[in-house]
């Protein structure tokens, strides 16, 4: 839906035109399960986004309407809920809750939200909603925060009000994305660098449509526990290390015999993945997409064999992609156990890529994959007014 039609929906509902903002979803190109070890990640902001339209009110009421859910909630800004309701409104409410804790008290407003980031598919519609709310409400309150500071507000909101243990990568990318660039982010210092993605290269995201969530939820936490167990063993030899970010592959291999094989493999994934992100950054700096794609493939193999967080469906999508002309690289992206793959594809091959991967996947699994094409986009901000 265009920004103009969302603005029209807002005007019709609330009787005023409102200021329009946008905040993108994101995809991680490489660097999986490294953020929780304060390592490196390399996401890009998508041209799938949440649009927010805000107009001020003269009281202390916040009306928030989601076009996606066709539902409106009304909050009293002087008595915000202190707990989640397990409802979409938790995400916008969480941001207001965090701002209130930081003594930012906006006056009343009417807000319309509408997004084309697929919900719950690992492309971070949640962060895009939070950031779209945060930029609109902060501007309304007359407060200027840096983009990384806005990202931290949103991460805090999702962690402490919504109750999801998400990392900084999602809101950070939604805030700081750069058109036609990937972001190399150091999750310890939050230093980041925008690295060029040629405009002839498309981000193609294939949604396997499976989420092995029953097994996945527990497995996800089990992986984190295994990594922490590995760190404790390593710390007996290297007391200065805090996380796997501080460990070299050589140090890890020296301790291999002291840990169960599974723990060693989980740690090996994280340690080598950090190194791969830095190599991949080097490949982008020199415009070497083939080299970048080879590293993506190694990352997929490590996610599959060492971290054991892939599954038959995402392996198949990667295998199908690797056979397509014009595909530089493919890997599972996101937490794992299903979800999406990210593929870097030459723009002039994208149509054939989509057709062949979709039909190959349907033939083998009976499942109709959803496939999204995107370029890397700018982070959140105001959109030009349309009248
Ligand atoms: P992901 O971030 O991978 O898309 P999450 O489960 O973290 O998945 O977040 C999805 C949730 O975010 C939705 O179920 C909904 O509650 C909320 N959300 C996302 N987009 C919108 C929207 N446009 N309007 C209202 N709520 C939204
Ligand atoms: Mg999310």
Image (spheres, rainbow, N blue to C red):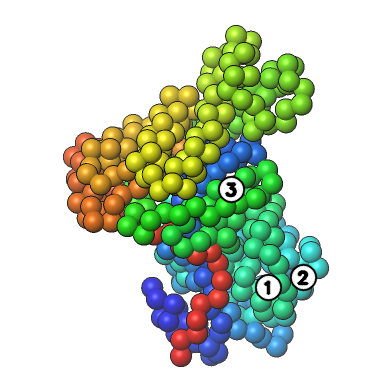
| Quarter holding residue 337 | top left
* Mark 1–mark 2 CB contact (< 8 Å): yes
Label 3 environment density (alpha carbons within 10 Å; few <14, some 14–19, many ≥20): many
| SS for callout 1 | helix
Above or below residue 123? Residue 269 is above
Real-space CA distance between mark 1 and mark 2, rounded to the nearest whole angstrom: 8 Å
Residue at numbered disc 3: 185
Compare marks 1 and 3 and give the one earlier in the sequence: 1
Real-space CA distance between mark 1 and mark 3, rounded to the nearest whole angstrom: 25 Å
Residue at numbered disc 1: 138
Real-space CA distance between mark 2 and mark 3, rounded to the nearest whole angstrom: 28 Å
Q: Looking at the image, which is closer to me, 98 or 205?
A: 205
Q: Position of residue 107 (x, y in %)?
A: 72, 80
Above or below residue 248? Residue 7 is below
Q: Position of residue 178 (x, y in %)?
A: 51, 61
Mark drawn on residue 151:
none
Q: Quadrant of the N terminus?
A: bottom left
In this orientation, does residue 97 appear?
Answer: no
Compare marks 2 and 3 and give the one earlier in the sequence: 2
What residue appears at the point 40 percent right and 41 percent down from the top-left corner?
A: 292
Residue at numbered disc 2: 104
| SS for callout 2 | loop
Q: Position of residue 40 (x, y in %)?
A: 58, 41
Is label 1's Cβ within 8 Å of ligand 1? no
Compare marks 1 and 2 and give the one earlier in the sequence: 2
Above or below residue 325? Residue 172 is below
Q: Looking at the image, which is closer to me, 65 or 148?
A: 148
Question: Is 130 left or right of 374, judged from the image as shown?
Answer: right
Is label 3's Cβ within 8 Å of ligand 2? no
Question: Is 118 left or right of 136, judged from the image as shown?
Answer: left
What residue appears at the point 38 percent right and 56 percent down from the top-left corner?
A: 198
Question: Is 145 left or right of 358, judged from the image as shown?
Answer: right
């Amino acid at each position: 839906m265009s920004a103009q039609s969302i603005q029209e929906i807002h005007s019709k509902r609330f009787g005023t035109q409102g200021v329009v903002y946008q905040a993108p979803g994101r995809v991680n190109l490489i660097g999986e399960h490294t953020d929780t070890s304060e390592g490196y990640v390399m996401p890009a902001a998508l041209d799938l986004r949440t649009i927010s339209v805000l107009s001020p009110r003269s009281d202390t009421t916040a009306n928030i309407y989601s076009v996606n859910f066709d539902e409106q909630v009304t909050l009293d800004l002087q008595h915000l809920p202190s707990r989640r309701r397990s409802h979409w409104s938790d995400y916008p409410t969480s941001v207001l809750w965090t701002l209130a804790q930081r003594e930012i008290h906006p006056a009343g407003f009417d807000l319309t939200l509408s997004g084309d980031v697929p919900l719950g598919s690992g492309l971070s519609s949640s962060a895009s909603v939070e950031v779209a709310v945060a930029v609109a409400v902060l501007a309304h309150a007359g407060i200027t925060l840096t983009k990384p500071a806005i990202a931290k507000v949103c991460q805090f909101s999702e962690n402490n009000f919504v109750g999801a243990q998400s990392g900084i990568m999602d809101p950070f990318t939604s805030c700081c994305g750069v058109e036609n660039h990937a972001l190399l982010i150091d999750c310890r210092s939050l230093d980041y660098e925008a690295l060029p993605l040629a405009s002839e290269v498309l981000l193609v995201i294939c949604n396997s449509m499976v989420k092995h969530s029953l097994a996945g939820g527990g497995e996800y936490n089990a992986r984190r526990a295994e990594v922490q167990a590995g760190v404790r063993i390593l710390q007996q030899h290297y007391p200065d290390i805090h996380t796997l970010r501080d460990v070299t592959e050589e140090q890890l291999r020296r301790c291999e015999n002291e840990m169960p094989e599974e723990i060693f493999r989980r740690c090996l994934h994280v340690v080598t993945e950090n190194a791969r992100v830095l190599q991949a950054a080097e490949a982008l700096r020199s415009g070497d997409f083939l080299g970048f794609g080879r590293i993506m493939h190694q990352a997929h193999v490590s996610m599959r064999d060492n971290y054991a967080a892939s599954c038959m469906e995402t392996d198949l999508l990667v295998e199908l992609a690797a056979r397509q002309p014009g595909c530089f690289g493919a890997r599972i992206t996101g937490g794992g156990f299903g979800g999406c793959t990210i593929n870097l594809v030459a723009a002039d091959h994208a149509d054939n890529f989509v057709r062949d991967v979709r039909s190959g996947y349907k033939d083998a699994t009976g499942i109709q994959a959803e496939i999204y094409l995107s370029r890397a986009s700018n982070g959140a901000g105001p959109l030009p007014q349309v009248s």
